[in-house]
Image (tube, rainbow, N blue to C red):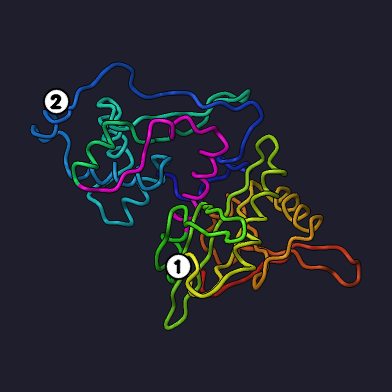
Amino acid sequence: MVEDSNIKTKISPFAVKPGEIKVFDGKDGFVTMDNILKRINEGHITDIHFKIIEIVNEFEFITSRQLFQILQYRKADIPSQDKLNAKLEQLIKLKILTRYFFQSEDGKGIYRVYALEKMGKYLLNSREIECKWQATDNTKPVHMIKKRLAGNQVIVAYLNKVKAFDSYVVKPTLNAKQSKKMFKPQAGIKLSKGDKSIDLIYDVVRREDGWEERFLERIKLFEDFYHNFVTLDSGYKQRPQLVFDCEDDKHMVEVFKILVTNQIVLDGIHYLFTTDLKQNEETLSKTLVQFKLDEETNKYKIETVELKILE
């Protein structure tokens, strides 16, 4: 597996490309549960396969690289990316998992995306593991899948690089009381050091068609959540810090402009921003930025927010 520090790309693999489509790369045909049970009884499908299925279920969409890093963090018995890929291939052939790649004018994407299949749900249910997957989940468009993948990358970066990492939540649920709507950012991160802790919630923003209007609608839900926040709302003792994960530096500016133009203020917090590629840095202590008004020029400038708890 290529280390994060050796990844040299200047464009996020999770950025949305014009005209990009999702292409099925799974298994055609029919597989019965009897086929799968035979494989389990023969020892071809083991506990490590079930751990893989559980993680795919938890994250909904995931790359093999992200999956391998999470398995390593959990000290699963899987020695290499190649070994994992072989097990994924087994699960694909049995239609327990399925697989996709993205294609645009630039050609095929460099990675595959894994998701649950019907047989995978049956197996998880047999072990009394909650699985809310339904077939329509796999019809989600490219930008929604890439949001999930970018959120995964944030989680993977924190659990591997931050000593104060405590826990994560995939898609934490927030309550916008006045709007009477529940909504979900892509990642929740809890950091703890001594008797202090901080909660970060990451909302991933992509440049899909019409994204500016969708973002403005979404930020109003955050505005509702923060304005009406009381202790233990959505499980938080205090207001979690919101971070926008953007495709690149220019995208951060575009997002901030929408906030300023529409005079959106979130009670009790400052806007923080990051980008996908910042998650590849060796330390996350300088990966968060904010926009500050320069009193001399009366223009906003990007300023790095250094948090020691991220070291």
Q: Is residue 46 left or right of residue 17?
A: left
Q: Crowding near pointer 2: few (<14 within 10 Å), some, many (20+)? A: few
Q: Residue at x 54, y 61 (%)?
A: 201
Tell me residue 309's x, y (percent). Answer: 51, 74
Decide which of 144, 298 is in the foreground and name it.
Answer: 144
Q: Residue furthest left?
A: 41
Q: Is residue 16 visible?
A: yes
- One can see residue 311 in this view: no
Q: Amino acid at mark 1?
A: Gly
Pointer 1 residue: 235
Residue 45 in the figure: left or right of residue 251: left
> Which residue shows up at 42% across the image and 82% down it?
194
Q: In the rendered image of this protein, does residue 40 appear above or below residue 8?
A: above
Q: Quadrant of the N terminus?
A: top left
**SS label for mark 1:** loop
Q: Amino acid at mark 2?
A: Asp
- Region of the chain picked out in magenta, as a range: 128-157
Task: Confirm or deny contact between disc 1 and disc 2 (CB under 8 A).
Answer: no
Q: CA distance from mark 1 to mark 2?
A: 42 Å
Note whether 236 is above or below 128 in the view shown.
below
Query: Could you say where residue 20 lies in the image, as x and y percent from the top left?
Result: 60, 27
Tally of numbered discs:
2
Question: Per the image, is 156 magenta?
Answer: yes
Per the picture, the main secondary structure of the magenta-coloured stretch is helix
Residue in the picture at 39% in, 30% down: 99
- Per the image, the residue denoted by label 2 is 34
- Please identify, in this view, whether the residue under mark 1 or under mark 2 is nearer the observer: 1
Residue 305 occupies quadrant? bottom right
State the residue lying farthest toward the right.
297
Disc 2, SS:
helix
Indicate the position of residue 258 as horizontal and vertical percent values: 76, 52
Q: Answer few, some or many: residues within 10 Å of disc 1's Cα (few below 14, many 20 plus, some between 14 and 19).
A: few
